[in-house]
Image (tube, helix red, strand yellow):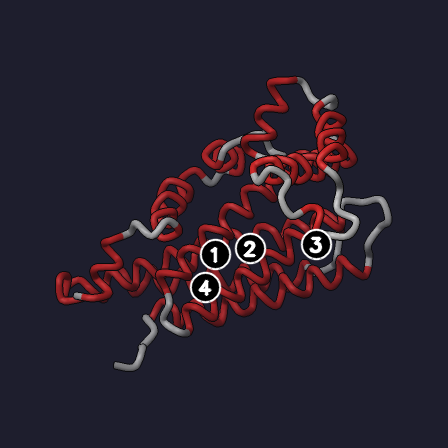
Amino acid sequence: MPYKPSETLKQYGPLLRRLLRLTEDTAKALRETRKPLGPDRILLAFLGKAADTLRAVVLLQKEGLCHEAQSLARTLFELRLSFDAFVELLHVDVRSACLRVIDTVMLEKVKQARASEFKGLDLIPGAPTPAELAKAEKEISSRYPERELKKLKQHGFSGMNGEQRAKRSGLSDEYNIAYRNFSRNVHSTDFTELILQEDPELIASERNAYLESRDAVCCDVAFISVAGIAITVNDLVGLGLDRRVRALMRAREQLLRERRALAG
């Protein structure tokens, strides 16, 4: 049977594609105004990941792979939480915030190399030796108190787990409703959806309502995650995309009003 997208996906599709274009244009504008010693490189990394992952969500939904799209919506939500943590650090000290990101990336690389007993490094021209990696790790470790270093190694540059970051971002409800549920998709343990794919008649009378609700949550999570990143970068750097941002948010509010009217 040919795949027929839910009404929710038909409604959200144009909005998500519009957000994707805004995110791509935000990155383009940032590249054109980059400062040599600013945090732009890291901001562009966030924007690039947000745009690419949102594009993947839209493509998966178009092909009826909504279960897989939920996994990537979870990725986008986690990206948003990390982004918010980075912006919070930027407001305290730009150099320190950027250094924390680079330091934690390096610490993770050393951890991975050590876990594999440094295998393969000798096959890569110019790769650091185990001794050089150990030296870099020692230098980074000297910059942080022991307790803080432990948090950085465990949770990354924010030093907080996902639940803590969600609370700081004001997204605890989204974390509890969406992030936890979508995690089952990532780990392939959401047997409810897997079984329903094979036997949809198990909830025949409620199937449409279930699909609409499922897709709405996925689209909402994807939207707030990516929009939060693009809008904040525009505000931080002053990229001049305010009019497009306002128009996009008005379009979302209109969509939500229409959905509430239909539900009521």
The kind of residue tagged 3 is Leu
Q: Residue at position x 75%, y 42% from top?
A: 128
| Nearer the observer, 153 or 63 | 153
| Nearer the observer, 111 or 197 | 111
- Secondary structure of the residue carrying tag 2 is helix
Pick whichever of labels 4 and 2 is earlier in the sequence. Answer: 2
| Nearer the observer, 159 or 20 | 159
Distance between the alpha carbons at the discs numbered 4 and 1: 18 Å
Q: Residue at position x 23%, y 54% from top?
A: 192
The kind of residue tagged 4 is Gln
Q: Residue furthest right?
A: 36
Q: Residue at position x 60%, y 37% from top?
A: 117
Foreground: disc 4 or disc 2? 2
Q: Which residue is mark 4?
A: 254
Where residue 15 sits: x, y (%)? 50, 67
Q: Which residue is mark 2?
A: 226
Q: Residue furthest top?
A: 146
Distance between the alpha carbons at the discs numbered 3 and 4: 30 Å
Residue 234 seen: no
The kind of residue tagged 1 is Ala
The kind of residue tagged 2 is Val
Foreground: disc 3 or disc 4? 3
Pick whichever of labels 4 and 1 is earlier in the sequence. Answer: 1
Q: Are marks 1 and 2 in contact (CB under 8 Å)?
A: yes
User: In the displayed structure, does residue 75 sit left or right of residue 234?
Assistant: left
* Residue 51 occupies quadrant: bottom right
* Residue 131 occupies quadrant: top right
Where residue 191 sits: x, y (%)? 24, 53
- Secondary structure of the residue carrying tag 3 is helix
* Residue 142 occupies quadrant: top right
